[in-house]
Amino acid sequence: MNHANPKNQKWNLFFGVLLFIYTVYGFWCMPSFGSPTDEFTQRAIGIENARFISGRSSVEKLAEHQFFGPIVETPLYLLEQLIYTKDISTQIYLRHSVLFAIFISALIVFFLLLKGLTKNDGASFFITLVLACNPRLFAHAHYNTKDTAFLCFILFGLYCFVQFVQHKNFTSLLLAAVWLGAATSIRLAGAFVLMACISTLAFSLKSYGKPILYFCMLSLLAFIASFPYLWIHPLEGIGQLITYTTQNPYPWKVLFAGKIHLVGNGLWYYVPLSLALSSAIIILALFLIFFIRAIRSIARKNFSIEQLLILQLFALPLLYFMITQPVFYNMGRHTQFMLIPVYLGAGMVLSAVWSNKIAKNTVLGIIALTCFALPVHKGNEMVYFNGIKSFWKPYSFELDYWTLSAKRAIQDLLNKEKTISLYCFDRAVENSIDMLPPNERERISLNVKDSADFELLFFRETPLQVNEKTIFAYGSKKEPYLLVNRLR
């Protein structure tokens, strides 16, 4: 009779307790987060794709809503129809709740994936803990149905892929192809993950013709199946998606590292620096050790398949972004999927030093301190930076690009005033207003500046200054990112 290792059972128990506490904390924090600028754009994608599938919309109409993950938005819209008579705030909270539940599932898969890679339950537990406590990932898990869903799908696919590499379970390879093909329909950056997997297959199998062919074909079919527009125009549609993505059509200015950057005037170090600024320094240090060791092992032709896979998952998109130098807005969210190989590599190194008590306890102590960033910053994705940011003066980076903190500011105003006449340059605050209960929404009116009593002033390019008209200020004293000013 097989008996489970008591040590493994201990870490599994710890993980179960962690997951329960984390889940309760996550749902308790949910009302703290507003609705992002893109919320109703994403809902429109789900609505139009659902209408097309049911035969109530045309291909031409669908073409206007073809981008950014109908595989996620369509099911979310269908779930909304189960409570279509409920208030819009309830429907939005349903979307956010489902997304957070998917993220919880992804944390479980990450834990299992790292256990399979390291064979060390303790190291896997602590790396999963620090991943879960990354304030930006935690925040995005409550509302970002594009990038968080993409990260989760990638994790699901990688787990299945590693299962195939380690155990040659062909069903796992097929499941990996489906997950990764669907993930690529959310962000075309999934192609980098597919390339890393195909290359790993070529190195790991002696006779790899059929598995690679099946993997490529099924991932392509999953990609097309996830895009209703591609059902009608597969080749033309794929070409349009590639053109849309590679031309980087975002017209907005981006503040990064103290400078304003325009389209066509990107920085080669944008992606590595954005990842470094919002990640735990201990994880960066561990991953750097992994990266150097992996490069040396490959140079000596003495590498493991796991090393090769993780290195490619990070290096392929990094090289692409450094060469093409795109200008991203809302720093970090487009490339948060690259944190997967960073944390996996860190886990490999922690596992390697686990038997050294001094090294292990030092790392675990720093990880424990790092995890306090989550409750301290309350998961606000636009105020968490590690110490590296101190090399720049205040207001050198974007802060609350999606105007998420509008919800908290409006609630504070409602606690102070019976009714509020409000002005904000960005109409996206309506999304956060829609998350409020109907009786609170009735007390709010949006007006032009000359007619409003209060103004929500978000930082964009000009540093904010607290003055005698300021009622509330959000952010640090040196760097507030939102002011609520009385206009009259």
Image (cartoon, helix red, strand yellow):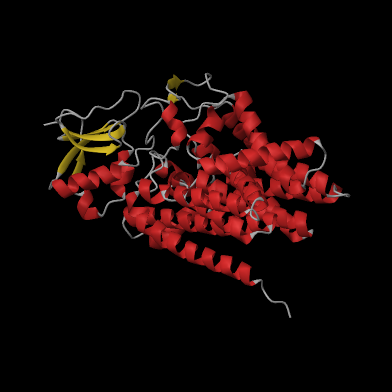
Instruction: Tell me where residue 277 appears, x and y as whole percent.
Output: 48, 35
Quadrant position of the C terminus in the picture: top left
Tell me the residue at 43%/20% (across/down): 259
Residue in the foreground of this view, choosing between 26 and 456:
26
In the rendered view, does 105 fall on the left or right side of 254?
right
Residue in the foreground of this view, choosing between 341 and 211:
341
- Residue 305 lies, with reference to residue 355, above or below; the image says above
Instruction: Tell me where residue 14 appears, x and y as whole percent.
Output: 52, 65
Instruction: Tell me where residue 192 appears, x and y as whole percent.
Output: 67, 38
- Residue 199 lies, with reference to residue 485, above or below; the image says below
How many numbered marks, from 0 up? 0
Tell me the residue at 72%/77% (across/down): 2
Instruction: Tell me where residue 25 appears, x and y as whole percent.
Output: 39, 59
- Residue 410 lies, with reference to residue 320, above or below; the image says below
Residue in the foreground of this view, choosing between 359 and 224:
359
In the rendered view, does 354 fall on the left or right side of 172?
left
Tell me the residue at 66%/49% (across/down): 348
Determine the residue located farthest toward the right in the rendered image: 207
Determine the residue located farthest toward the front in the rendered image: 358
Determine the residue located farthest toward the bottom in the rendered image: 1
Residue 280 makes an appearance in the image: yes
In the rendered view, does 105 fall on the left or right side of 396?
right
Q: Quadrant of residue 67?
A: top right
Quadrant position of the N terminus in the picture: bottom right
Tell me the residue at 62%/44% (across/down): 341
Residue 330 makes an appearance in the image: no
